[in-house]
Image: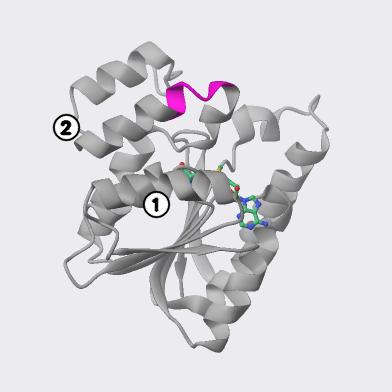
């Protein structure tokens, strides 16, 4: 029996057609990103977005912090399912993509629920800590070189039993390929080893999209 499938674009579309209905603005962002060429791959996959939505609903998550927003697909997907009093705070450094994301949030009538902070994420994280902000869930999806720093800040900004989700931890499968030794692959390997040893969290890696680590603060 086949245990693990390779999810190509055709299968991803089949899953999408048989799983969920996308919000019109999610569709708009997907169409927009499709026209961006190679950087489209920055966006989380449709399946990941839907998984996040179920995860948020199932765990009664209200306040979310996102580190790395791009054109807004993941943030919008999450904001669509947080309750009325909930919110998503987005950190990004790119003025152009952030402006685009804000337009999509407004078009979906979610601009009150989504706060966007345009600055280097480490700077924003320190500010949020000074303001004593606490989140139910934090999604890390920005520059990989800072993943360990982002994780350490996130732990302090997270409520007990809250969740940290981290994208790209399987790095196209390269992390398990001994012939791949480029800088970014090694950075992701180092991050994964760091999380493995970190006893502040329960954790598992899901082979969804490019691989997601799910951590629960103990
Ligand atoms: C992989 S993309 C995020 C994709 C997004 N979560 C989505 O699903 O569409 C990474 C983002 O991190 C941002 N980024 C990179 N370095 C950063 C930094 N030092 N501080 C804040 N954002 C940063 C980039 O501008 C980019 O938009």
Where are the magenta residues, as a range? Answer: 33-37
Q: Residue 112 location in percent, x, y?
A: 27, 65
Q: Label 1 belongs to which residue?
A: 102
Q: Visible in this render: residue 199?
A: no
Q: Label 2 belongs to which residue?
A: 21
The answer to whether 100 appears left or right of 56 in the picture is: right
Residue 160, by quadrant, is: bottom left
Please tell me whether residue 7 is drawn above or below residue 194 in the rendered image: above
Please tell me whether residue 106 is drawn above or below residue 168 in the rendered image: below
Q: Residue 210 location in percent, x, y?
A: 52, 34
Q: Secondary structure at mark 2?
A: loop
Q: Residue 147 location in percent, x, y?
A: 66, 56
Q: Nearer the viewer, residue 5 or 17?
A: 17
The answer to whether 174 appears left or right of 164 in the picture is: right
How far apart are the two marked residues, 2 and 1, measured between alpha carbons?
22 Å
* Disc 1 residue crowd, few under 14, some 14–19, many 20+, Cα 10 Å: some
- Mark 2 or mark 1: which comes first in sequence? 2
Please tell me whether residue 24 is drawn above or below residue 135 in the rendered image: above
Q: Secondary structure at mark 1?
A: helix
Check if residue 34 falls in the magenta segment. yes
């Amino acid at each position: 029996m086949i245990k693990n499938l390779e999810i190509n674009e055709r299968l991803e579309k089949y899953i999408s057609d048989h799983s969920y209905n996308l919000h019109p603005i999610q569709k708009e962002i997907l169409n927009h990103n499709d026209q961006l060429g190679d950087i489209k791959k920055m966006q989380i996959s449709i399946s990941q977005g839907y998984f996040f939505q179920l995860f948020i609903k199932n765990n009664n998550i209200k306040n979310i912090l996102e580190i790395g927003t791009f054109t807004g697909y993941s943030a919008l997907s999450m904001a669509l399912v947080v309750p009325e009093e909930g919110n998503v705070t987005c950190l990004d450094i790119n003025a152009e993509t952030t402006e685009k994301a804000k337009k999509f949030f407004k078009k979906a009538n979610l601009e009150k629920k989504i706060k966007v902070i345009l600055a280097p994420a480490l700077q924003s994280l320190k500010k949020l800590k000074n303001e004593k902000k606490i989140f139910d869930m934090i999604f890390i999806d920005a520059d990989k070189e800072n993943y360990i720093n982002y994780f350490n800040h996130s732990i302090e900004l997270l409520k007990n039993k809250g969740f940290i989700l981290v994208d790209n931890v399987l790095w196209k499968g390269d992390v398990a390929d001994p012939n791949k030794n480029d800088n970014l692959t090694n950075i992701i390997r180092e991050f994964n080893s760091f999380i493995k040893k970190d006893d502040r969290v329960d954790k598992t890696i899901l082979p969804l999209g490019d691989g997601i680590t799910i951590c629960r603060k103990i």
